[in-house]
Image: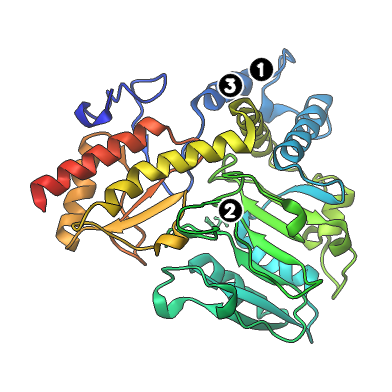
Amino acid sequence: MSAVAAKPGSVSSHASSNDRCFNFSAGPGCLPEEVIQQAQQDLWNIAGSGVGICEHSHRAKVYDKILADAEADCRKIGNIPAAYKILFLTGGATSQNFMVPANLLGQDETADYLTTGYWAEKSAEQAKLYGGVNEAWDGRASKHSYIPSDAEIKYSAKPSYVHMCSNNTIYGTEWRASETDASWRLPKVPAGVPLVCDMSSDLFCRPTDFSKFGLVYAGAQKNIGIAGTTLVVVHEDLLKRNPRELPGMLQYRVHAKDESRHNTPPVFAIYFSGLVFKWILKQGGLDAIFKRNVEKAGLIYDVLDKSSFYKAHARKDSRSLMNITFRTPTAELDDKFVAEAKAQGMDQLKGHRATGGMRASTYNAFPRAGCEALAQFMREFERKNG
Ligand SMILES: *Cc1c(COP(=O)(O)O)cnc(C)c1O
C-alpha cells in the first residue's frame, strides 16, 4: 500500500491508525505508535496504581522503577560502560551548550569545536562565555555541506575537550565511515582529550561505542522521546573537573549524586524515553534499527542519485540517515513539492530557512512505508515537472 494514493486523514498505510499522516518533522519527531498508545493508558492509571504517571511523586516506588528501568535499558541499548553516569536533565540540548563548558572548561583553557552545522555553531558561541574556543573546523564556507576529514581539522595545542555534533539536523550531514558505509567515523582527537558529542538528532540510530566519548548529550524529542528531558552520558572522570563555582542545578556531579532527582524532574518525559528504550530493545536493538535506517534513507537517496532534477545538499560521504536535504531546480517548485506532498499525506517536508528546499526527517520511529511513499512521490513529481 502507498500513502501516495491516499487523502489526508485516510493514510491507511501508516501503521495501525487511519487518522495520522507521514510526519517528516525534524523535531519534535514522530514517535512509535505503540508507545503513544501505552502512554495514553498510563496517563490515566499506571501499573495498576490507580494514579496517572503525571500525578505520582518523583520519590514514589512507581517512579523509582520507571527511572531505574530507563537507565538500565539505555545502558543496555548503548552497551554503556559502568564508568559512565546516565543523567536525565532539563533545558534541552541547548542548555548543554553552556553546561559543558561551565563544568569542563577553565577560563584560561581552550576547547576545540568542530563547527559542522547550525547547532554546532551555537555550541561554540556559548562556550566562549567560559573560556577559549578554537574552531578546529569551520564548515560555514561550504554551507555545512560535508563533514571534514582528519587532515582538514586543526586542533589547538592542548584542548581541554573536543566538541562535535554527530548529525547536523538542519543541513542533513552526519559523521559516517564513507559514501557506502553509514557506520561511525569519529574525528581522531589528540591523545587523552575527551570527545564531547551532541547526538540530539541521531542518538541510537546505529551501533555506538560510548567508550570513545567523554560526554554525550541529546535532547530527547528527536530519537528517544519528547521534549522536556535531555539525556547526558558522562564519564566519571569528567565529574571531577571543577573549573569554577556553579549553582547546583548546573553541576553534573550534583545531578549524578542525586540520581537525576536534584529537583522535581520531568517525570512524564523521562517515563516516555523509558518506553522508547523498551521499544528499541523490542525492535532488536541498534543493529536492527541501523539496518532499517540504512534501508529507509536509501530509498530516498536512491531517487536523488538517479535524478538530475533534484539536488542533494549533503556531499555523499557525509549524508545523514536521519535528515535528508534536497531541492528542486527552483524555489517555486520546492513550494509546489511541499504542498502536493502534504495533500498526499506527507507532512513537514519544508526545509529549514538556512538551507531552503526540502528536508525529510526519517528518525528511528519513522515507518519505512513513509519512505517508500515519498520516494514514489518524488519520482512522479520529477516526471511531471522535470
Ligand atoms: C534540535 C537540536 C538541538 C536543540 O535541542 P533543544 O532540545 O531544542 O535545545 C541541538 N542540537 C541538535 C543536533 C539538534 O538537532
Give how far across and how far down residue 200 sits, in percent. Answer: 58, 53
Q: Is residue 193 visible?
A: yes
* Ligand 1 lies under 8 Å from the Cβ of mark 3: no
Q: Quadrant of residue 72?
A: top right
**Which image quadrant shows ligand 1?**
bottom right
Disc 1 marks which residue? 45
Q: Position of residue 227 (x, y in %)?
A: 57, 45
**What is the distance, in whole Å, between disc 3 and disc 1 at their CAs?**
11 Å
How many angstroms separate mark 1 from mark 2 (CA)?
Answer: 31 Å
Q: Horizontal and vertical percent for residue 254?
A: 86, 56
Residue 348 visible in the snapshot: no
Tell me the mark number nearer the camera, choosing from 3 and 1: 3
Which SS class for mark 1? loop
**Amino acid type shown at disc 1:** Asn
Q: How is the image coloured?
A: rainbow
Q: Which residue is mark 2?
A: 200
Earlier residue among tags 1 and 2: 1
The residue lying at 55 percent from left, 68 percent from top is 120
In the image: residue 329, left or right of residue 188: left
Mark sitting earlier along the chain (3/1):
3
Q: Amino acid at mark 2?
A: Ser
Estimate how packed mark 1 is, as few (under 14), some (14 to 19) or many (20 or more) residues with alpha carbons within 10 Å. some
Graded by Cα atoms within 10 Å as few (under 14), some (14 to 19) or many (20 or more), the crowding at tag 3 reads few
Label 2 CB, ligand 1: below 8 Å? yes
Distance between mark 2 and mark 3 Cα atoms? 24 Å
Task: Rate crowding at label 2 as few (under 14), some (14 to 19) or many (20 or more) other CA atoms within 10 Å.
Answer: many
- Work out whether mark 2 precedes mark 3 in sequence or the reverse, and give the earlier one: 3
Dividing the picture into quarters, in which one does residue 39 lie? top right
> Quarter holding the N terminus?
top left
Contact between labelled residues 1 and 3, with CB atoms less than 8 Å apart:
no
| Residue at the disc numbered 3 | 38
Q: Name which residue lies at 90% across and 65% down.
A: 240
